[in-house]
Amino acid sequence: MVSAAEQLASNLNFGAFAKAEDLKRRIWFTLGALLVYRFGTFIPLPGISIDAFKAVFAQQSSGILGMVNMFAGGAVERMAIFALNIMPYISASIIMQLMTSVSPQLEALKKEGESGRKQINQYTRYLTVILAAFQAYGIAIGLEGSRGSAGAVVPDPGWFFRMSTVITMVGGTMFLMWLGEQITQRGVGNGISLIIFAGIVAGLPSAIIGLFEMARNGSLNTALLFALLLMMLAVVAAIVFMERAQRRLLIQYPKRQVGNRMFQGDASHLPLKLNSAGVIPPIFASSLLLLPITAAQFMSQGGQMGGGEWFNTVVAALGRGQPAHIIVYILLIVFFAFFYTAVVFNPKDTADNLRKYGGFLPGIRPGEKTAEYIDYVLTRITVVGAIYLAVVCVLPELLIAYAAVPFYFGGTSLLIAVSVTMDTVAQIQSHLLAHQYEGLIKKAKLRGATSNKGRR
């Protein structure tokens, strides 16, 4: 089997890359757009005290704010205009995908083609504005009730601060959504994914420098440092292998006669990904698990009463590093892996499409039996995919909680970073391949024109 590195080296032709002017323009546009995004993560919200908020954030960094801050490239820690990042749009997209599977109207709209897709995208934008407005208003209320060692976070609270915060943060989210669409159309890769990717890797250099500084000061063993770096490389290699892993079902097509000619039956494969749910299960699991902890922290910061003794007990049991936290985290990842796989892949529709085009699985009757067999295979490989997601996401938690290892990349962020890199490299390869085909077509036309002149 050819390794990923060998395949990448064989597919990337640097000579062709130097001649692909359109690809270079797309790459420069992508880098420029990401630079604009990074600049916006350093512009703070108006009306807040940065020093006071830093003290408050330091107390809540272990909750959901810490995870969102990593995705936002430090914008939450600085409470910048891009603090919400692109998360409301992702949440709206996931909700719309779930709605299309339960709503007959949206499902019919999805099957209408390009016009239906545009309409669903418009609904997604409207839902993004609503979600971002609710989240921004909640953040404004939380900021007004927060007080750090340097004083109140909001020196002048009131409706003016709340409305300005909502308008600023919603505007920042909508600008990032527009910027992501521009990257997708005029750049390289998926714009939304690249924005999240840029936020995650923005803190990687400082984290690596911090590790070496700890090793230099003696607070971290040098052998442990290199073991940690090797383990990160091993986890990245495992993610690449598992994300590319597929179970291919053989599909055969019968012989067919066109006019007086008989064509032999073709054979192809139906690829079933080992991890069809992608990074959705860890994101949902992390958000649900850290939500009660963050709610308790906000209530304590706002001076409000807690939710009772039972609530405090549950919050303490679900704290990061606790056994209950690890167990519930694994169960949520497994649940969402199966749930989202069922949403994005419908075995019955696949079986109907195969029967419509005359394809069949050898030894399986078309129709209902084919759908049952595909569902059986998909369930088995989803078990492996769910276990893989759970191991990758829980391993950093165990290292941080029990081994006191400063592991920067969490499971979710590492999955996103590796997956986006693989998708972007694949798109660059496709652009290079298209450029090579264009060069061959131009040469063929030039040779044809030269031969025609010679004949004349």
Image (cartoon, rainbow, N blue to C red):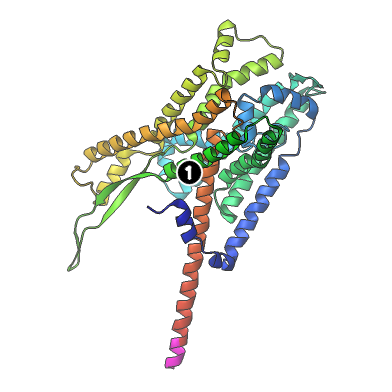
Q: Is residue 286 magenta?
A: no
Quadrant location of the C terminus in the rendered image: bottom left
Residue 253: image quadrant is: bottom left
Is residue 42 visible to us here? yes
Q: Is residue 304 above or below residue 159?
A: above
Residue found 39% across the figure and 44% down from its top: 245
Q: In the image, is 16 to the left or to the right of 250?
A: right
Residue 129: x, y in percent? 61, 35
Residue 268: x, y in percent? 29, 53
Q: Is residue 157 above or below residue 165?
A: above
Magenta stretch: helix, strand or loop mostly: helix
Badge 1 crowding class, 10 Å Cα cut-off, few under 14, some 14 to 19, many 20 or more, is some
Q: Secondary structure at mark 1?
A: helix
Mark 1 residue type: Ala
Residue 390: x, y in percent? 45, 30
Judging depth in this view, the residue of 240 and 84 nearest the camera is 240
Residue found 47% across the figure and 86% down from its top: 450
Q: Is residue 454 magenta?
A: yes
Q: Which residues are magenta?
A: 451-456
Q: Which residue was labeled with disc 1? A: 237
Is residue 134 visible to us here? no
Q: Is residue 325 above or below residue 339?
A: above
Judging depth in this view, the residue of 358 and 49 nearest the camera is 49
Q: Is residue 55 above or below residue 241?
A: above
The residue furthest bottom is 456
Total labels drawn: 1
Residue found 42% across the figure and 28% down from its top: 334
Residue 254: x, y in percent? 20, 55
